[in-house]
Image: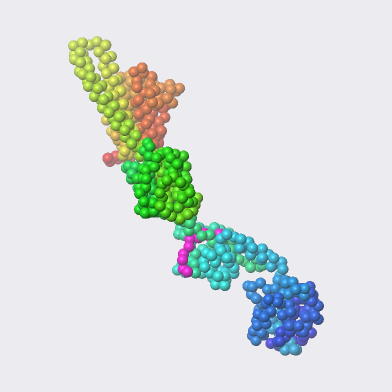
């Protein structure tokens, strides 16, 4: 290195905004500019001749001598103490944060080291504040260079999460945080962080979970909240890593509970539901010791008891539905009861080695008891999951009870239908026979009127049997030809003088068994109100089909009521026929609009039906 005039150096140093100090090969100060007065409180002449350690904190002096000698042996231009905080000692003994750059020079006096010292108090205060915030974050935080991806900083929570000490991560690529077998995927994720500048990532682009890999090789699911920022001229990215293991487990449990609920809703008896609940409590929620009790009028009977519950507590007793034991109290009050230590309960029942306990009512059906041998084993999240299980169990038992009630009602209705068919049809058939015999010998108006009464009675019987035996539900939806269905139904109800026509032919999708009740009831209604010579028309419309007639029509004020159960304008009517039409239409997912036909009669539009018009290019192929 060429020699330069010492005076030239001194002139340059005096013009520098930084404190400039020259140190010889023995570590003694040979020159200091006037900036040392402001920075260290010394006059320049006070420092010349002293070892450089005079402005080094006392605690660091021994270490500094070693580093100084090592540098003099192999000098180079570089910053001092990269990535660590440096302090200088002022004349009054106070410390000041500084930044130091070192340069070897050849002067008239041989090798000297020039130290440019700058006060960085403002930057240090900012960094201290930044460090305080960093450590205050409850999650692991890793700060990396946004350009190179090298880790520059991490908080203590990162050590807790990953098991690395800071010196093991600083300077390494951020890819070390993630599974080593998936470097490319996580490099792309890092670049996406940089591009977005601020983003939260919960999944990789293919929907899989994001993981970090610990020092021990364990994979932990996390979500990452990344933020790009500037600090002291550097562009950095801070990644906040939040472990979501508990959340993932909670989501898994909720999904598994959903699947278990399907099985609960398919169970055929109460005992099966109790066993499914106990199994779900153990296999899904991880509660090993569970007892499910079902109630009768006076007692709670243990129906399902896991093996662990038997081992922990022995045979379980039958509790009264009203009592001071926790299970009875939970059932009677309808509230969850949790004990951190159930030994505090003095009710005379032996619970073996059990300590923690949860008691959850299953509505009016029973109680779930969940226990654990450890004190305070359950927390609010356990309360929530167990409550979901108990609600699902209650729903399943309510469904089963409802089905049993409906079955009994259906049995009674079927008995009623049989009585109706037998006790009314038999004498009605006899009356028909007598009527036909009388007509053969006589032709009088009274006999015709009697025939109409008998026909009405037969219609009532048909309507009631339709409701009781067939219900309104639809089974199989299939494409049907409107004309074929209408023709078949017309033959079942029409008189010789009434007429039917199909205005627009096509296909419509319906249950072939139930749709016949719709047309037959509408045809009967048209004949009943329009007379024996009524003309009925049907057709496929846009998004549905219609049935219309040329009878007297329905007054506009009555159109919203004619489909209601029991509504009729005839003294001898039942009000069942049109309500059956509405119920079957709704079972198909259709709406029914009652309007006026083009001829002034009644028109019923079935809206929402799936239809296909026939035209010249359409060939129907059943």
Q: Is residue 540 left or right of residue 124?
A: left
Residue 291 drawn at (x, y percent): 38, 48
Q: Residue at x 43, y 21 (%)?
A: 555
Q: Residue at x 55, y 72 (%)?
A: 168
Number of marks present in the image shown:
0
- Quarter assignment of residue 476: top left
Identify the colour scheme used.
rainbow
Q: Is residue 146 left or right of residue 464?
A: right
Residues drawn in magenta: 216-225
Q: Residue at x 32, y 26 (%)?
A: 521
Image quarter (top left, top right, bottom left or bottom right) of the N terminus: bottom right
Q: Dominant secondary structure of the magenta stretch?
A: strand
Instruction: From the viewer's side, name the closer residue of 446 and 361.
Output: 361
Q: Is residue 505 visible?
A: no
Instruction: From the viewer's side, name the closer residue of 465 and 346.
Output: 346
Instruction: Establish if 238 lies above or below 302.
Output: below
- Quarter assignment of residue 126: bottom right
Does the magenta segment cover residue 267? no
Instruction: Establish if 28 lies above or below 318.
Output: below
Image quarter (top left, top right, bottom left or bottom right) of the C terminus: top left
Q: Residue at x 26, y 16 (%)?
A: 451
Q: Is residue 560 visible?
A: yes
Residue 373 drawn at (x, y percent): 43, 55
Residue 379 drawn at (x, y percent): 49, 52
Residue 561 drawn at (x, y percent): 42, 25
- Quarter assignment of residue 365: top left
């Amino acid at each position: 290195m060429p020699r330069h005039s010492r005076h030239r150096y001194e002139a340059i140093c005096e013009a520098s905004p930084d404190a400039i100090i020259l140190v010889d090969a023995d570590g003694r100060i040979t020159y200091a500019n006037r900036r040392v007065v402001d920075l260290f409180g010394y006059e320049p002449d006070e420092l010349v001749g002293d070892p450089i350690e005079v402005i080094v904190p006392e605690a660091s002096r021994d270490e500094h001598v070693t580093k100084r000698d090592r540098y003099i042996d192999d000098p180079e231009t570089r910053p001092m103490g990269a990535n660590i905080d440096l302090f200088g000692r002022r004349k009054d003994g106070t410390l000041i944060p500084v930044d130091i750059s070192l340069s070897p020079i050849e002067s008239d006096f041989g090798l000297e080291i020039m130290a440019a010292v700058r006060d960085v108090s403002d930057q240090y205060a900012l960094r201290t504040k930044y460090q305080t915030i960093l450590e205050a974050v409850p999650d692991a935080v890793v700060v990396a260079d946004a350009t190179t991806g090298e880790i520059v900083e991490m908080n203590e929570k990162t050590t807790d999460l990953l098991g690395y000490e800071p010196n093991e991560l600083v300077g390494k690529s951020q890819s070390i945080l993630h599974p080593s077998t998936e470097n490319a995927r996580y490099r792309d994720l890092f670049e996406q962080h940089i591009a977005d500048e601020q983003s939260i990532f919960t999944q990789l682009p293919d929907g899989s979970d994001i993981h970090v890999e610990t020092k021990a090789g364990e994979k932990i699911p996390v979500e990452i909240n990344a933020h790009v920022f500037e600090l002291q001229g550097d562009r950095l990215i801070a990644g906040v890593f939040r472990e979501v293991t508990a959340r993932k487990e909670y989501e898994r449990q909720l999904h598994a509970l959903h699947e278990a609920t399907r099985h609960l809703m398919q169970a055929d008896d109460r005992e099966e539901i109790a066993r499914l609940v106990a199994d779900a409590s153990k296999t899904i929620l991880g509660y090993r010791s569970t007892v499910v009790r079902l109630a009768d009028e006076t007692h709670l009977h243990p129906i399902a008891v896991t093996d662990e519950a038997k081992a922990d507590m022995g045979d379980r007793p039958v509790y009264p539905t009203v009592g001071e034991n926790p299970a009875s109290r939970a059932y009677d009050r309808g509230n969850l009861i949790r004990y951190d230590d159930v030994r505090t309960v003095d009710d005379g029942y032996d619970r073996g080695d059990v300590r923690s306990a949860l008691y959850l009512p299953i509505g009016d059906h029973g109680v779930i008891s969940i226990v654990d041998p450890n004190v305070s084993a359950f927390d609010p999240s356990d309360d929530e999951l167990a409550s979901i299980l108990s609600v699902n169990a209650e729903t399943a038992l309510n469904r089963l009870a409802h089905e049993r009630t409906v079955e009994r009602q259906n049995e009674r209705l079927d008995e009623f239908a049989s009585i109706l068919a037998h006790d009314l049809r038999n004498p009605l058939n006899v009356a028909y026979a007598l009527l036909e015999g009388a007509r053969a010998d006589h032709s009088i108006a009274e006999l015709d009127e009697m025939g109409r009464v008998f026909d009405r009675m037969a219609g009532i019987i048909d309507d009631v049997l339709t409701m009781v035996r067939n219900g309104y539900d639809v089974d199989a939806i299939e494409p049907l030809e409107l004309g074929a269905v209408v023709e078949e139904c017309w033959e079942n109800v029409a008189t010789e003088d009434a007429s039917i026509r199909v205005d627009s032919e096509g296909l419509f999708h319906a249950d072939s068994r139930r749709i016949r009740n719709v047309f037959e009831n509408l045809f009967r209604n048209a004949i009943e109100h329009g007379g024996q010579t009524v003309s009925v028309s049907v057709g496929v419309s846009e998004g549905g089909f219609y049935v219309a007639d040329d009878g007297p029509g329905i007054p506009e004020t009555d159109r919203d009521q004619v489909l209601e159960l029991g509504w009729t304008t005839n003294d001898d009517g039942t009000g069942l026929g049109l309500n059956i039409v509405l119920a079957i239409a709704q079972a198909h997912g259709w709406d029914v609009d009652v309007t006026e036909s083009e001829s002034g009669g009644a028109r019923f539009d079935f809206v929402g039906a799936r239809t296909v018009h026939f035209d010249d290019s359409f060939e129907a192929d059943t």
